[in-house]
Structures are given as C-alpha cells and as structure tokens.
Amino acid sequence: MIDLPGLARAQASLIDAGRVLDRANMVPATGGNFSMRLDEHFMAVTVSGRHKGQLSGSDIMVTDFECVPLGSTLKPSDEALLHGQLYRLRPDVGAVLHTHCRAATALSCLVEGDELVLEGLELLKVFEGITTHEARLRIPVVDNSQDIPALAREVEPRLPQDDCHVYLIRGHGLYTWARDMTRCLYQVEALSALFDCELTVRRCR
Ligand SMILES: CSCCC(=O)C(=O)COP(=O)(O)O
Ligand SMILES: [Zn+2]
C-alpha cells in the first residue's frame, strides 16, 4: 500500500464519515462512495462494493483523478471518475460525498427537467456563499446511467460554477462537495432535511 502525506488522516475521516452516514441510513447496503483530496494529483477514495458503515483503512485506496490506482490492485468505486472530475475542475474542493439518501432519491424522481431549485429555507445558509434564506440553490439533475464517463460529461458544464454545491442523479442519489469533510457532512445532513421539507411541501400543495 502506498503512503502519501495526509493519507492516514484522510482514511480516518472517511471511516468516520461512513459511520455517521450509515447511522443516518444514507448509505444502505453497499451504496454510496466517498473521497478526499490528497494533493493536486491524487485522491483517497473508497474501494468498490464495500459497506460504508464498516470501512477500515484497507477499504480506502489512492487513485489519480482519472481513477488510475496508485500502489493497489483493488478496484476503486465504480463512480470514482465523478469524484476525480470534481477535484480536477475545482481546486477548492477537498472532500466529496455520494449518498443514496432516500429523500434525495425520491425527489429526483419527481423533478421534471434538468434542475431543482430550493428557495426560502433557512438551512440553505449551510452552503458557502449563501447568507440569507431568500437565496436560491440551483441543483442540476441528470438521468442515471451505468455509463459513468457519459454521466460525467453531462454534468461537467455545471460544476465549475462557485454556487454549484450538489447535483442529483435521478433515481440514484446525490453528490456534494466542500472544502473539507466536516463541511461536506454538514451539507449532506442539510440536503437530507431540505429535500424532506421539499417533499412534504409538494405533498401538501
Ligand atoms: C448497491 S449500490 C450500487 C452502486 C452505487 O450506486 C454506489 O454508490 C456504490 O458503488 P461503489 O462501486 O462505490 O461501491
Ligand atoms: Zn451510488
């Protein structure tokens, strides 16, 4: 196993994140994948097919942003390219989380078109750059596909925008990213609550 500066700390953060998200029922079965930036070329990313609530150091490997493993014969997450894409396009991004949160998955099925807009909600202030509930959070929604490079190409034009913090894959789950893992976990929690709220509002209309 390769040893890069920051890898041990990244592994510990990713293991913790898995426990938190598993307890919150956001990564059922082997769903979800997580990563952290190590430097300008490499990321620590979860190995494919592992239960994210039971991760150990050997369930986290190093790849470059094109998903080529460094010092490992293990298979990185099937969706690792979506993580690498964010580190490649956004030098400010230090952590990426993908969850199968139920509210995100359900809401993504109800959205017609390629965007969901959340507005008028205090919790939006969790996102960097948002300072008032009057702001609008624009969330790209893309159709699910097993062709991950095609999925990456579809979402790519939206990602460099500073106010883009999350996207939904229809019938699948969410991707969100932040400067560090703590903020990224806050965003996942906030998104789950915001999506729940939106679902409730839609049900009552
Ligand atoms: C049983 S979940 C299907 C795959 C998926 O969507 C996912 O998030 C986990 O894939 P990975 O290869 O990262 O384990
Ligand atoms: Zn997934």
Image (cartoon, rainbow, N blue to C red):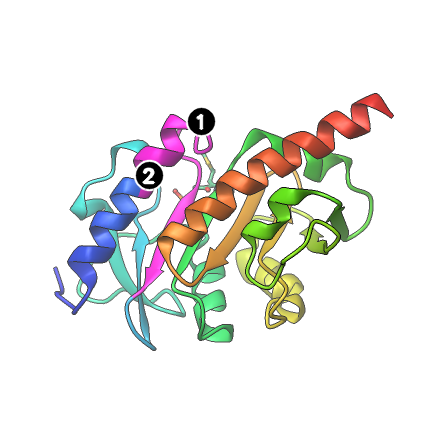
Indicate the secondary structure of the residue bearing disc 1: loop
Closer to the chain start, of discs 1 and 2, is 2
Which amino acid does the dot numbered 2 rest on? Gly
**Residue 192, placed above or below residue 169:** above
Residue 138 location (% of width, % of height): 72, 56
- Res. 25 mark: 1
Which residue lies under the disc numbered 2? 18
Which amino acid does the dot numbered 1 rest on? Asn
Is residue 92 something one can see in this rendering?
yes
Query: Which one is in front, 128 or 156?
Result: 128
Is residue 73 something one can see in this rendering?
no
Residue 156 location (% of width, % of height): 61, 68
- Res. 156 mark: none
Quarter holding residue 31 = top left
Indicate the secondary structure of the residue bearing disc 2: helix
Q: Which residues are magenta?
A: 17-37
Quarter holding residue 163 = bottom right
**Residue 85, placed above or below residue 47:** below
Query: Which one is in front, 111 or 181?
Result: 181
**Residue 26, placed above or below residue 161:** above
Tell whether 179 sits left or right of 170. left
Query: Which one is in front, 199 or 45?
Result: 199
Tell whether 131 sits left or right of 4. right
Q: Farthest residue in the front direction? A: 132
Label 1, label 2: how many angstroms apart (C-alpha)? 10 Å
Q: Residues within 10 Å of mark 1 (few under 14, many from 20)?
A: some
Specify the quadrant that holds the N terminus.
bottom left
Residue 17 location (% of width, % of height): 33, 42
